[in-house]
Image (spheres, helix red, strand yellow):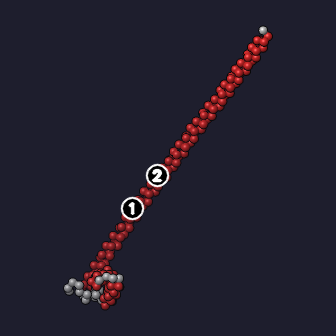
């Protein structure tokens, strides 16, 4: 059978290919590209021509059964492997999440401690400055009192001196 011979395809497969070819042409593909896509699609759907020729058909079925058994075994193995990896991944992610949470908690505690320390130092600074202001006020008051006392003393001495001079 020469390459590209379509005699092993059923009438239904040929009709399907023709229909696919027409729709591909409508989409703007060339004649050759549309035909290639159509037959590739039929082959993909049915696994090639279905018209049998005695022994070929039987060998195809047995080969297909063997490959499906292998595929089922592989799929089962893949599923179990996938489950194990997903379990590990879940455990890892849970561990990572827990670590992130604890790290976040520690960070918030640290920040809160820093804030409290800052507040305490600012309170102390405010207290000190308030104490200094309070301490300065009496000294200012004392100075004004002293100045007032000196003025009063000067006035009295001046009065006394004034009284003494006219009497002489």
Q: Quadrant where the N terminus lies? A: bottom left
Query: Cα distance, mark 1 to mark 2?
Result: 21 Å
Q: Secondary structure at mark 1?
A: helix
Q: Quadrant where the C terminus lies? A: top right
Q: Secondary structure at mark 2?
A: helix
Q: Given the current orientation, which residue lies at the most extreme top position?
A: 168
Residue 36 figure quarter? bottom left
Residue at 68% over, 27% down? 141
Residue at 73% over, 21% down? 152
Q: Which mark is residue 57?
A: none
Residue 153, compared with residue 95, is above or below; it is above
Residue 156, compared with residue 83, is above or below; it is above
Rendered location of residue 10, percent (x, y) = 30, 89
In terms of sequence position, does the residue under pointer 1 or pointer 2 come before the other?
A: 1
Task: Check contact, mark 1 vs mark 2: CB within 8 A.
Answer: no
Can residue 46 be seen here? The reply is no
Rendered location of residue 167, percent (x, y) = 79, 10
Camera-side residue: 160 or 140?
160
Q: Which residue is mark 1?
A: 85
Q: Which mark is residue 99?
A: 2
């Amino acid at each position: 059978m020469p390459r590209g011979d379509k005699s092993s395809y059923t009438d239904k497969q040929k009709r399907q290919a023709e229909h696919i070819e027409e729709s591909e042409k409508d989409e703007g593909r060339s004649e050759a590209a549309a035909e290639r896509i159509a037959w590739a699609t039929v082959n993909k759907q049915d696994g090639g021509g279905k018209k049998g020729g005695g022994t070929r058909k039987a060998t195809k079925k047995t080969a297909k059964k063997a490959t499906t058994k292998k595929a089922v075994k592989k799929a089962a193995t893949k599923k179990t492997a996938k489950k194990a990896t997903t379990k590990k991944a879940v455990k890892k992610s849970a561990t990572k999440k827990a670590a992130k949470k604890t790290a976040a908690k520690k960070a918030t505690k640290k920040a809160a401690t820093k804030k409290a320390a800052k507040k305490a130092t600012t309170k102390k600074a405010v207290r000190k400055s308030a104490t200094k202001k309070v301490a300065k006020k009496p000294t200012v008051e004392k100075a004004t009192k002293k100045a007032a006392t000196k003025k009063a003393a000067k006035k009295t001495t001046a009065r006394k001196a004034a009284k003494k001079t006219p009497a002489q």
